[in-house]
Each structure stands twice: as structure tokens, then as C-alpha cells.
Amino acid sequence: MAAVTANGAWYVEAAEAEDMSTQFLDDWNAATSSPQHPLRYPWVFWFMHREPGSKIENYNNAIKKISTFATVEEFWGVYNRLTRPMDLHNISDYHLFKQGIRPIWEDNLNGGKWIVRLKKGLASRYWESLVMAMIGDQFDVGGEICGAVISIRHSEDILSLWNQSADDGRVNLRIRDTLKRVLNLPTNCIMEYKAHKSSVADNSSFRNTDLYL
Amino acid sequence: MASNGYLSPPASAPVAVRRAAPGEKPPHDYGTTPGGTIFGTTPGGTRIIYTKDALLNLSRSPLANTPPRGLAYIPGVTKVAPPKSQPKKPEEQKKTEQPPKKQEDKDDLFEMEI
């Protein structure tokens, strides 16, 4: 266990940390008789598609809920039955959002998203890495993360990661750095950020973004 | 023994101890275990962390291959049998035969605070 020293500092020894996690696993499995591994949050997969050249009349109707999951095992049960992003038709999006948060700008007006543009052919691999980092709670920013999107387009594919507070610079830089780490992006990779308010204003997801190194 | 200066003091095994000031947040990899995190929780039990490797390991368990309940049928997107009203040969080759689902009491087990 983590211990608290006389001056109030906590410390943990690596070997003890291991005991702690396996103990938790054992307790969990004994209590549930179902060897599933809980995630911190329940998540919802969504899908959206529009024909090239067409416009979405009603976003709410266009976006379809695929499934909800709350454990690692349920996640794989769903994920393994989804067509890989690079095999989807153009102008398709997968969204993976926390249960209770809809992937809609207007529902998240204080929020924004990090954007990573991918060459065609890379979408499936990067999407998988991002999804695993997100449900595995690798982003240490409290409840800031809302969800992620992979957008399959004609000439590029775009990965987005939505968070709650577009104006919180410290949180956003932390998210950016974690993104770079989990996606293994080069350090000089250009990252873009766009607040949802701006997206509502110019009715565009990926134009007029702020660039960061 | 050691007083002649030729023998070094017995080496104690290195122990990974990391300290943080009172009230400071734990490091982001607090739950990391030697050889990679299986999963870890932070002192308040707030985070449940899985590394990519841990998730990939769990993808091999039989439960992870159980067809999820309530997976929407979206042609070309979800690999699931179409609704019965429109009988159709299954497009997917191998995933049609699955063990019977065993998830009756699952929903109330995993409700978590958000």
C-alpha cells in the first residue's frame, strides 16, 4: 500500500504497487464472480456517414449510437465487431464518447478539440492507440476528456480529441503532450486546436484552427 | 572489516521510492507496476489505468469475444447479424458462431460514478 511518512509525504514501493493492483483484481473478481475489468467510465461508440457532396440536415438524426461498454472485455466485444476506420467509405466518422456526453458542439460550448491530421492509410492504427489510451485513463486531466473522433475523408483522415475546457491552457498542454506520447508522434509534429465556439461560428470542424508545435 | 577501506559497505537492494510533498498530486504513472501496469488505482481510487499492453492482453479472454448486447446493426459498419425481419446471409466469415451470451446481471455491476 501507499504509506504516509511522518511529515505527511506518501510513498509507494514498486513491488507494493504490484501487490496493490493484483489484490484489487482478486477482490473485484471474487466480488463479482465475473472476471471482467472495469473501466473508469462507461463509453459509447457512435457512427456517422454522409455521402460526398451532401449536407447533414439534422446532426442529431445523422449520428447513430453503436453500443455502450463499461469493461475492458465489453470494449473488445464491440471494437472487434466494427469495420476498421480505413475500410469505411469517405466522409464517415467514428465517435467514442463518455456516456452522457453527446458528440455535439452545442452541448460542449466551453470545450474544444485537439486535431491530428493523418496521411491516408494510418487511421486504423492511430485510432486504436488513441481509443486505448482514452479508455485506459492515460490522460491524467481529471474529467476533462470528453471523447475522440476519427474522421475518414477524401485526402486525409483526422483524429480529434475533445475536452471540456478550451480555455484551460495547462490542461490542454498536458493533453497535447499525452497525445504525442500515446500516438508516438514526432516531437516537432504540428498539432491543431479548435474551440467548439469557433466551430459553431464558422460551421467547420477542421478549418481555421490554432497551430501548436 | 570495512574499516580498512578495501571493502565497500554491503549494497542494499535498490528500492524504488518516490516521494511527493504533502498535498501534491501523485505522478501520472503512479499505478505503473514493474513490467507494465495491469491496472492501478490512485489513493482515492479515482483513476483506473490500463496500458495499451494490458488492454491488448485482455483482448484474448473469452469474455472479450462474447458478442455484445445491444450492438446496433449498421450495414458495412458493425459485424453483427441483421435483424430477423430481413433474413440475409451473414457477410462475416468467422464471427457468426459465438458462445451464448452470459451477461444477464452485468448492467448493475458496473455502474460507476462519473
Image (spheres, coloured by chain):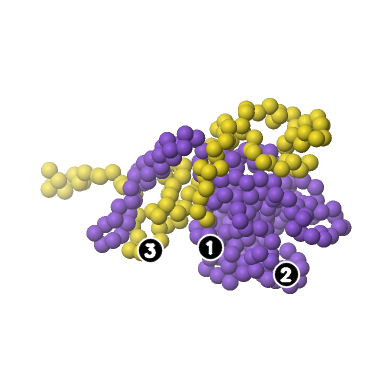
Q: The chain drawn purple is chain what?
A: A
**Image point (69%, 61%), residue name:** A104
Disc marking residue A174: 1
How far apart in space, not on screen, are marks 1 and 2 (Cα)?
25 Å
Q: Position of residue B60 (x, y in %)?
A: 57, 33
Q: Position of residue A175 (x, y in %)?
A: 56, 61
- Callout 3 amino acid: Glu
Disc marking residue B24: 3
Q: Position of residue B114 (x, y in %)?
A: 52, 55
- Compare residues A146 and A179 and report the one nearer the observer: A146
- Chain letter, disc 3 residue: B
Q: For the residue labelled by badge 2, is the local secondary structure a helix, a strand or a loop?
A: helix
Mark sitting earlier along the chain (1/2): 1
Q: The chain drawn yellow is chain what?
A: B
Whether callout 1 and callout 3 share a subunit is answered no
- Callout 2 amino acid: Val
- Callout 1 amino acid: Arg
Whether callout 1 and callout 2 share a subunit is answered yes
Disc marking residue B53: none
Q: Is residue A208 visible?
A: no
Q: Is residue A201 visible?
A: yes
The image quarter in which residue A179 lies: bottom right
Direction from residue A173 to residue A109 in the image, left or right = right
Task: Point out the frontmost of discs 1 and 3.
Answer: 3
- Chain letter, disc 1 residue: A
- Compare residues A48 and B27 and report the one nearer the observer: A48
How far apart in space, not on screen, are marks 1 and 3 (Cα)?
17 Å
- Is A128 rendered above or below residue A194? above
Q: How dense is the environment of label 3, judged by Cα within 10 Å: few (below 14), some, or many (20 and up)?
A: few
Do the CB atoms of the residues marked 1 and 3 lie less than 8 Å apart? no
- Chain letter, disc 2 residue: A
Q: Which residue is mark 2?
A: A200
